[in-house]
Image (cartoon, rainbow, N blue to C red):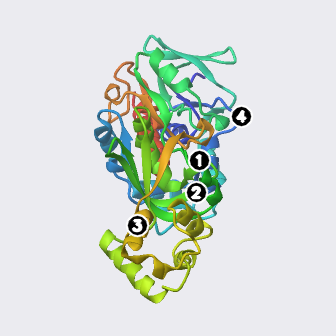
């Protein structure tokens, strides 16, 4: 029996789209190009799957024209409470962390894929692996899908959930935009959105593995182009961690037009005046210590020594020898340590991509194509990307659910 709905892509959006269509009673075929479902889900959150966040709102998402309007309508009724109830209804126990991120209580991303696949199996959905789609063609009132294996499949409605080119080793590719363009859509060129950043300073490798809470500010030609705050991870090539990832989208856009520097505030909890007072009080108490010893207890690992050397200060010099001007210079460095950004790490390390199907070409209420009626689009294929912390997976679940439900009503 031919399916009424064909869902292309077995990732986060595709799994939920297929499940919601099947729940509505529609015969569904879920076509996954790879040998397993949900491979990006399995890698998310360090293998734990950060599946949503308590602070789901349109302002946490980015994209082309109309992004806030589309996201606002797409997420209406599909907020964080919905996501929790949805997965708990599938039998998945959840836990929240203090920063708002939500994970499976078992700590395994595999459990997320398993409960979704179990629900699809219970409803009799037709799940096909190694079933890449080479082309989608309009065929009367429906669609003809030409498979890479050589076969054909007809469906009344199609939900494209092919994702983007991030994590190509896990199945990410440019096939989704190509299929959408073949049906009349225009697409914004893909670029890494949440990706670690390379820096010019080679000595950063001495800090490899050190984590700090920091605020970052990317600047180009004297203006701020992006800001973020969170955990910063120093690496052998530059910077990573949530703070760097959230900065990467706009920083890389600016970098395409010229040089971009990154100012790192190692003590974002304090304003400049408060922090100056803190340093003065510590200098009175620990004036006979070396500068490296003075910063020990404030910064982890080798960070004090490396920081001081790059500021032109001797790690073994005494604090009392700094004077007021030296203390002010120390403060400026700790609140604005500068690096020059060079570019992103490879696509293999990009968590999501920006770009995708142009949003004005999609109905925000149903996520149905305005170019090809009966075609629906969801997830990373759309020109929407969110902050790190579960926002992208949440959009995938929510947009997949909305598209799957809408497709089932045609």
Distance from the alpha carbon under mark 4 to that under mark 2: 35 Å
For residue 37, above or below residue 321: above
Mark nearer the viewer, 4 or 2: 2
Q: Position of residue 303 (x, y in %)?
A: 58, 66
**Dot 4, crowdedness within 10 Å: few (<14), some or many (≥20)?**
few
Asked if labels 3 and 4 touch by Cβ distance under 8 angstroms, the answer is no
Sequence-first tag of 1 and 2: 1
Asked if labels 1 and 4 touch by Cβ distance under 8 angstroms, the answer is no
Whether residue 87 appears in this view of the structure is: yes
Mark nearer the viewer, 2 or 3: 3
Residues 225 and 19: in front is 225
Sequence-first tag of 4 and 2: 4
Whether residue 100 appears in this view of the structure is: no
Residue occupying the point 45% across, 39% down:
252
- Residue behind mark 2: 234
Q: SS class of the residue under badge 4?
A: loop
Q: Which quadrant of the figure has residue 315?
A: bottom right
Distance from the alpha carbon under mark 1 to that under mark 3: 55 Å
- Residue behind mark 3: 329
Q: Residue furthest bottom?
A: 285
Sequence-first tag of 1 and 3: 1
Distance from the alpha carbon under mark 2 to that under mark 3: 23 Å
Marking on residue 35: 4
Distance from the alpha carbon under mark 1 to that under mark 2: 36 Å
Q: Position of residue 238 (x, y in %)?
A: 57, 50
**Dot 3, crowdedness within 10 Å: few (<14), some or many (≥20)?**
some
């Amino acid at each position: 029996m031919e399916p009424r709905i064909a869902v292309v892509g077995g990732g986060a959006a595709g799994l939920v789209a297929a499940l919601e269509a099947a729940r509505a009673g529609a015969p569904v075929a879920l076509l996954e190009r790879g040998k397993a479902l949900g491979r990006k889900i399995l890698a998310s959150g360090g293998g734990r799957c950060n599946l949503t966040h308590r602070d789901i709102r349109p302002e946490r998402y980015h994209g082309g024209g109309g992004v806030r309007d589309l996201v606002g309508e797409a997420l209406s009724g599909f907020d964080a409470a919905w996501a929790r109830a949805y997965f708990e209804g599938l039998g998945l126990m959840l836990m929240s962390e203090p920063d708002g991120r939500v994970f499976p209580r078992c700590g395994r991303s595999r459990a997320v894929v398993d409960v979704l696949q179990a629900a699809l199996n219970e409803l009799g959905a037709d799940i096909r692996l190694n079933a890449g789609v080479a082309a989608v063609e309009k065929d009367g009132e429906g669609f003809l899908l030409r498979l890479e294996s050589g076969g054909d499949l007809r469906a009344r409605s199609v939900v494209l959930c092919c994702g983007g080119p991030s994590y190509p080793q896990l199945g990410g590719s440019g096939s989704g935009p190509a299929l959408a363009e073949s049906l009349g859509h225009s697409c914004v060129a893909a670029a890494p959105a949440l990706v670690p950043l390379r820096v010019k300073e080679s000595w950063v490798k001495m800090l490899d593995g050190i984590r700090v809470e920091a605020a970052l500010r990317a600047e180009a030609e004297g203006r701020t182009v992006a800001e973020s705050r969170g955990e910063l991870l120093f690496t052998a090539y530059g910077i990573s961690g949530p703070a760097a990832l959230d900065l990467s989208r706009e920083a890389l856009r600016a970098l395409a037009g010229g040089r971009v520097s990154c100012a790192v505030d190692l003590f974002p909890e304090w304003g400049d005046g408060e922090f100056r007072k803190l340093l003065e009080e510590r200098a009175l108490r620990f004036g006979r210590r070396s500068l490296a010893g003075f910063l020990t207890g404030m910064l982890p690992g080798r960070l004090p020594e490396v920081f001081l050397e790059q500021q032109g200060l001797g790690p073994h010099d005494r604090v009392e020898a700094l004077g007021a001007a030296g203390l002010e210079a120390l403060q400026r460095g700790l609140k604005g340590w500068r690096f020059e950004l060079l570019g992103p790490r490879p696509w293999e390390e990009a968590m999501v991509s920006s770009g995708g199907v142009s949003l004005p070409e999609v109905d925000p209420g149903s996520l149905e194509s305005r170019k090809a009626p009966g075609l629906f689009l969801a997830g990373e294929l759309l020109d929407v990307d969110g902050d790190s912390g579960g926002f992208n997976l949440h959009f995938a679940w929510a947009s997949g659910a909305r598209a799957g439900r809408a497709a089932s009503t045609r």
